[in-house]
Amino acid sequence: MTVESQPPRPRLAAGREHVVAKVGEIEPGDHKLVPIGRHGVGVYNVDGTYYAIANYCPHEGGPLCSGRLGGRSVTDERAPGGASLVEDGQYIYCPWHQWGFELASGTTAVKPEWTIRTYPVRVENDEVIVTA
Ligand code: FES
């Protein structure tokens, strides 16, 4: 008996599209928490670029989107104290233990092998759309 090979099946979509806001509804530097999934999804506007992340911290399950936005510190010999803040507003800091995660990549310097869940965002016809 021979086993016939099957043609590859089409991949299922990674998620469903959700219209989460109108353009202009989420101001730069602000976010909107929308009821998608078990914990919700935070949609952030960073200088006109949108990012979407799960409202869940992989450390101990904190409500990540209740945290503050900020940047990251880098060594800067010319700066007072020897450090400067860069990429301000591109990192979310968990309110429970202050782990910082980059919105774009979901990565953290605290534990590089861990990431938060991020979702694709696009703008179409004046609507902000998240696929989750
Ligand atoms: S639960 Fe988020 S840093 Fe600990």
Image: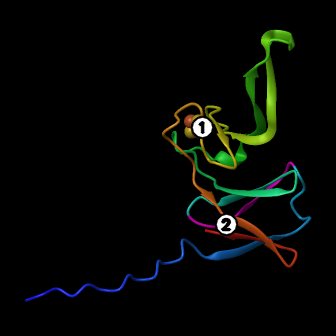
The C terminus - image quarter: bottom right
Tag on residue 15?
A: none
Lateral position of residue 98 relative to residue 113, left or right: right
Distance in Å between CA atoms under marks 1 and 2: 24 Å
Q: Residue at x 86, y 48 (%)?
A: 29
In the rendering, at what x and y percent does residue 118 appear? 62, 56
Q: Which marked residue is nearer to the observer: mark 1 or mark 2?
A: 1
Q: Give the quadrant of ligand 1.
A: top right
Decide: is 130 above or below 55.
below
Tag 1–tag 2 contact (CB < 8 Å)? no
Q: Tag 1, which secondary structure?
A: loop
Q: Earlier in the sequence, mark 1 or mark 2?
A: 2
In the rendering, at what x and y percent does residue 97 appear? 61, 31
Q: In the image, which residues are magenta?
A: 29-37
**Mark 2 = which residue?**
35
- The amino acid type, in three-letter code, at marker 1 is Thr
Q: Tag 2, which secondary structure?
A: loop
The N terminus - image quarter: bottom left
Decide: is 130 above or below 115.
below
**Mark 1 = which residue?**
108
In the rendering, at what x and y percent does residue 89 appear? 81, 41
Q: Quadrant of residue 72?
A: top right
Lateral position of residue 102 relative to residue 127, left or right: left
- The amino acid type, in three-letter code, at marker 2 is Pro
Q: Quadrant of residue 127?
A: bottom right
Count of marks, rendered view: 2
How crowded pointer 1 is (Cα within 10 Å; few <14, some 14-19, many 20+) is rated as some
